[in-house]
Image (cartoon, rainbow, N blue to C red):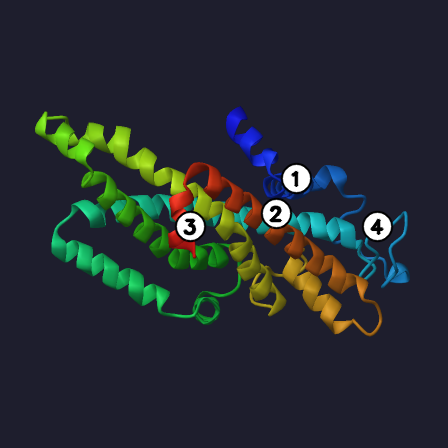
Amino acid sequence: MKKIIYEIIKEPLGLIGLTLVSLVILLSFGADLFSPFEPSQINIRDKLQNPSLVHILGTDQLGRDLFSRVLHGGRIALKVALISIFISMIIGIVVGIAASIGKKWLDNFLLFIFDTIRSFPTIMFALAIVTLFGPSLETIIFIVILTQSPIYARIVRTQTLMVINSEYIQAEKVLGINFMRLMVIHIIPNVVGPLFILASMDIPFVIAIEAGLSFLGMGVRPPIPSWGSILNDGYSFIDNSPWPLIAGGLPLIITTIGFTFLGERLRDIIDPKLKKYIN
């Protein structure tokens, strides 16, 4: 771990990414500690104030402290992203390995399912699901799992086929090594590494989905703070104050830059060959 961290911070790209990601995670999960106000505390007298020593990012149309709302909104965004991507990875590993070692008809059927799900535009698919099941955190997580699992499963399938067909695996099969042992020692470690790299680069995408749905009023429900709902408020009152819009957009930009830079650096360190799958 220390070696990987050293390799990350050795390059400016990795150092910037790791710093921004660490900052976002620390402030989001420590929101209760760092927030000067309750995120839903209304104070009409202080509405649409500019940044000050009391309100670092100013206030919204209801006088709520934007800095506190941004911190708690970050917790919601990371919660959705981490839970949904973790479950997607587990499903992707199981289904991808099943497709690679199963019968040909099973492989073809699973590939058909993957392509069918991925053929729908993500936002349109998300809007359809929200319309059916209603807006909630659980619905957003369900949407991400459905759309991301096929991507991870395809990567796992490809990686597994490469490992299974390699010479050293064929040699171990000839020696009579148990298949489960091959799976645990060789196959799973070779597919988990690339998945973690992809996951780190997918986190901003998942956060953007949550923010986009909340911006449209189909994500997190008020009064729960969300970067998307803060953006929506800022758009509605942009003629009165630009700060709610800045407060909602800035963390999205920082998070996207941080996780993208970190993922790029991890890819270069762990698996440079993965670049052809991402690009």
Q: Nearer the viewer, residue 171 or 24?
A: 171
Q: Earlier in the sequence, mark 3 or mark 4?
A: 4
Q: Earlier in the sequence, mark 2 or mark 1?
A: 1
Secondary element at tag 1: helix
Q: Nearer the viewer, residue 79 or 271?
A: 271
Instruction: Point out the frontmost of discs 3 and 4.
Output: 3
Q: Amino acid at mark 2?
A: Gly
The x and y percentages for residue 26 are 66, 38
Marks 3/1: CA–CA distance? 23 Å
Marks 3/4: CA–CA distance? 40 Å
Q: Earlier in the sequence, mark 3 or mark 1?
A: 1
Marks 2/3: CA–CA distance? 18 Å
Marks 2/4: CA–CA distance? 22 Å
Secondary element at tag 2: helix
Q: Would you name the residue on which mark 3 appears?
A: 275
Marks 2/1: CA–CA distance? 7 Å
**What is the quadrant of residue 2 in the picture?**
top right
Q: Nearer the viewer, residue 188 or 276?
A: 276
Q: Earlier in the sequence, mark 1 or mark 4?
A: 1
- Residue 109 as seen in the image, left or right of residue 135: left
Q: Amino acid at mark 1?
A: Thr
Q: Would you name the residue on which mark 2 appears?
A: 258
User: Are circles 2 and 1 on residues that touch, CB within 8 Å?
Assistant: yes
Q: Would you name the residue on which mark 4 appears?
A: 56
Q: Would you name the residue on which mark 1 appears?
A: 19
**What is the quadrant of residue 8 in the picture?**
top right
Q: Amino acid at mark 3?
A: Lys
Regarding residue 222, the answer to whether it shows in the image is: yes
- In this figure, what is the number of numbered marks? 4
